[in-house]
Amino acid sequence: MKHIDNLPTSPGKFKEKSAYIRLRHHFSLAKTTFWTLAFVGLIYISFFRSLHIAHSDSSRRFLRTSFYGPDWEKRVKESSKIGSGNGNGVCVLVTGAAGFVGTHVSSALKQRGNGVVGLDNFNDYYDPSLKRARQALLARLGVYIVEGDINDEELVRRMFDIVEFSHVMHLAAQAGVRYAMENPSSYVHSNIAGLVSLLEVCKSVNPQPAIVWASSSSVYGLNNKVPFSEKDRTDQPASLYAATKKAGEEIAHTYNHIYGLSLTGLRFFTVYGPWGRPDMAYFFFSKDILKGKSISIFEGPNHGTVARDFTYIDDIVKGCLAALDTAEKSTGSGGKKKGPAQLRVFNLGNTSPVPVSDLVSILERLLKVKAKRKIMKMPRNGDVQFTHANISYAQKELHYKPTTDLQTGLKKFVRWYLSYYRDGKMSDQ
Ligand SMILES: NC(=O)c1ccc[n+]([C@@H]2O[C@H](COP(=O)([O-])OP(=O)(O)OC[C@H]3O[C@@H](n4cnc5c(N)ncnc54)[C@H](O)[C@@H]3O)[C@@H](O)[C@H]2O)c1
Ligand SMILES: *[C@@H]1O[C@H](CO)[C@@H](O)[C@H](O)[C@H]1NC(C)=O
């Protein structure tokens, strides 16, 4: 409307009258313009809608027949083959297989003889070339990752048509606490809609798989009773990420209750290690320390320490495998529940919170570079001040017992980091 406002007004003695006429003229002009625009807009919208639908239909058909064709089917089958080891007839669909935890879990499953097929959409939340490198690593082990979205029910159904998965290890998600303020809908898309789509397929296939999935320690939110136990309250999330993980736990309850799906949620506590996630502090601290860039270390109110219960990836993998191994069968069939099914939630942490400033000191020693520290008040954008897991339930049920302290784990991370970014051919970003 700016161009209309900017029209010169005619000065003079007929100002009052001409203003009135102009106003009337302006009004009817606006009315005509409005209806014309509305009409044109409607035609425009319906035209492009039909175009879009036609387009996505044909591209879908194209994908189904060529991209997801016989060759693709063969690769999926090949990857799902159960080895001669102690596979126990276990065949796992791993979602988020090109992710940090997904890669490690897929590799461990394959190496002990289970059938494994991955699913990942390779989104660019962080450098996709790292996901591609993990994919290449898994390919060498014989694990194929299907490229697709967990929201694509048709695709997931197709995978279940080809392979009778006994288990689903669901790790695909939009991770990260701070990014939720930038792109909230990606959290709803992957962590809520995507979870529901996946469970819809799982509940309707025969036999139903048992599902183990990643929740998060962030569900404890503003809970300040430490250590965090599974029975503590989780109804005060401090970020949208946490809220979507909490929603996931409630959705899991529903699908267990109505359809008899066996569901195990794992609340991971700050997982770190080789092939880790570039958006996490230990990772970008290393990068910035090496570059001589200053790093921001947060502190809580009254100079309070910010600490994390850092958990090494190998310990998490053991917990994931134990959760799969102790998962009971789902009880439903034909989309109907036949009896009560297993529903569990476990903390998987390390039980020893380490202040972030100590993390930096360890990194300085390992990288042999002094960090430029900048102490800052922790912004209120989703992070909590402290996490500490009570793992006695996982210890009892899963024989989960973390064995890697931060020093030892970071040493392995740094060794990997240096060879991947410095000595390797990978582009530094
Ligand atoms: N790493 C941690 O410290 C930590 C802590 C708590 C919980 N978790 C949870 O553990 C799981 C694995 O985390 P991670 O650290 O490996 O993260 P990650 O981002 O490395 O892995 C997630 C993978 O899922 C894929 N993905 C995301 N949305 C998808 C979609 N809609 N369809 C298909 N693929 C999709 C991504 O491309 C990515 O490769 C996530 O559910 C995460 O929320 C991780
Ligand atoms: C840890 O959790 C268990 C329940 O799994 C509980 O019995 C125990 O008291 C908790 N320990 C602490 C120190 O809170």
Image (cartoon, rainbow, N blue to C red):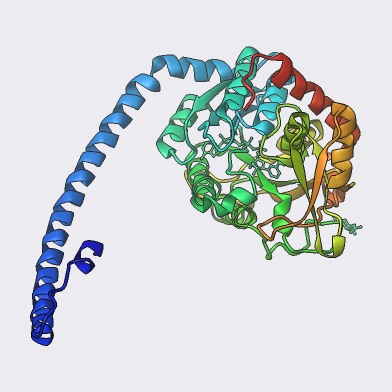
Give residue 231's position: percent from left, percent from top.
78, 60
214 up-or-down from 27: above or below:
above
- Left or right, 251 with respect to 13, comes to right
> Can residue 269 be seen by looking at this rendering?
no
Q: Residue at x 49, y 49 (%)?
A: 193
Count of number-bearing discs = 0
To which quarter of the image does residue 23 belong?
bottom left
Q: Residue at x 40, y 36 (%)?
A: 154
Q: Quadrant of the C terminus?
A: top right
> Can residue 288 be seen by looking at this rendering?
yes
Q: Quadrant of ligand 1?
A: top right
Q: Nearer the viewer, residue 75 or 280?
A: 280
Q: Quadrant of the N terminus?
A: bottom left
186 up-or-down from 85: above or below:
below
Q: Residue furthest front?
A: 12
Q: Residue at x 11, y 61 (%)?
A: 36
To which quarter of the image does residue 229 belong?
bottom right
Q: Nearer the viewer, residue 338 or 60?
A: 60
Give residue 394's position: percent from left, percent from top.
82, 45
Q: Nearer the viewer, residue 291 or 112?
A: 291
Give residue 93's position: percent from left, percent from top.
58, 31
Give residue 427's position: percent from left, percent from top.
62, 20
219 up-or-down from 140: above or below:
below
